[in-house]
Amino acid sequence: MIKTVFERSLPVGETFSIKKNVISNGTGKKRVCIVSGTHGDELEGQFICFQFQKEILEEIDCLDGTIEVYPALNPMGIDSISRGIPNFDLDMNRIFPGDPQGTMAEQAAAAIVEDIKGADMVIDIHSSNIFLREVPQVRISEMTADVLVPWARHLNTDFIWVHGAATVLEATLAHSLNTRDTPTLVVELGVGMRINHYYGKKMVLGLKNLIAKMGMWKGAVDQSAITDPIVSVGDQVSFVNAPASGIFSTETHNERIVEVGDSLGQIISPLTGEVIEDIKAPCRGYLFTIRAYPVCYEGSLLARIHRI
């Protein structure tokens, strides 16, 4: 059942509308919300929302509870493939919990929080931006780690990153919901403006596994295909930044163990034909982020490695 969460008229006869699909079956009272499309240039969630609903509806009798899918919290951003809300020059994931009396964007944020709060679990799906390629991972703040890490282990991701809570994260949807006793897991995978079907199907299996662990899904879940994730806690992540500007050329990929001194790529000069810098792994560890956008400036993030 399609329901409207928030709707407002736009100046030239169009409508800003946020919708959700509600799928219910059985007598179970638990409710899980799948959320995506907060950033308009992050599209992995669009495929995941489609595929997850498709598989649930094919075996609807196995569902005992309610699933609510919000594929596009920022529909104007998705329409224009822009990260923020067009016209407002605004990152939607920096205005939560919103304000019912504020601007249209703030009103939308407030309506979203009000609609979702109270769910038994929320999965907030993000892609990376256009610059970085990420393995499927869950990101959790230290303050919620004790509650959320055990649930995150069921999501079939490769990596769980427990990090310090930066002040900016207090304005995110996940923080707003977690502080309202609505457990929320933030998933990040892939690269901006693209869809990785392998990652998407891996995530769908993880979602089915999670709701099975919650007692909402009676269908088969292939446990042999569920990944036991690496959990990174505290200061275990090394950042590799560009020592010079140029074109970052790499043939490596993430999802692998690198050794100290392994090549991660080169910063090259198309003008002179020179290699400006060889980029080497500074430590042994799990490479979970690699730069996807070739142009880099001094200081640009090239890679992230979980130190082993």
Image (cartoon, grey):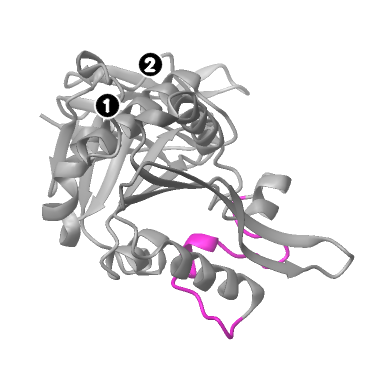
Q: Is residue 254 above or below residue 181?
A: above
The residue pinned by badge 1 equals: 287
Q: Which mark is on residue 105?
A: none
Residue drawn at x 68%, y 66% as measured from the top left: 7
Report, in whole angstroms, how far the alpha carbon at label 1 lies from the one at label 2: 10 Å
Rendering quarter of residue 259: top left
- Magenta span: predominant SS is loop
Label 1, secondary structure: give it.
Answer: strand
Q: How many numbered marks are there?
A: 2
Residue drawn at x 40%, y 30% as measured from the top left: 61
- Left/right of residue 136 with respect to residue 273 in the rendered view: left
The reply to whether discs 1 and 2 touch (Cβ–Cβ < 8 Å) is yes
- Left/right of residue 307 with respect to residue 281 in the rendered view: left
Q: Amino acid at mark 2?
A: Thr
Q: Percent position (x, y) of residue 221? A: 27, 21
The residue pinned by badge 2 equals: 252
Q: Earlier in the sequence, mark 1 or mark 2?
A: 2
Q: Which residues are magenta?
A: 83-102
Q: Is residue 233 above or below residue 231?
A: below
Residue drawn at x 85%, y 70% as measured from the top left: 11
Label 2, secondary structure: give it.
Answer: loop
Q: Is residue 5 above or below residue 67?
A: below
Q: Percent position (x, y) of residue 87? A: 73, 65
Nearest the viewer among 31 and 283 is 31
Nearest the viewer among 110 and 255 is 110
The C terminus - image quarter: top left
Q: Residue furthest bottom?
A: 101
Q: Percent position (x, y) of residue 71? A: 55, 45
- Left/right of residue 82 with respect to residue 227 in the rendered view: right
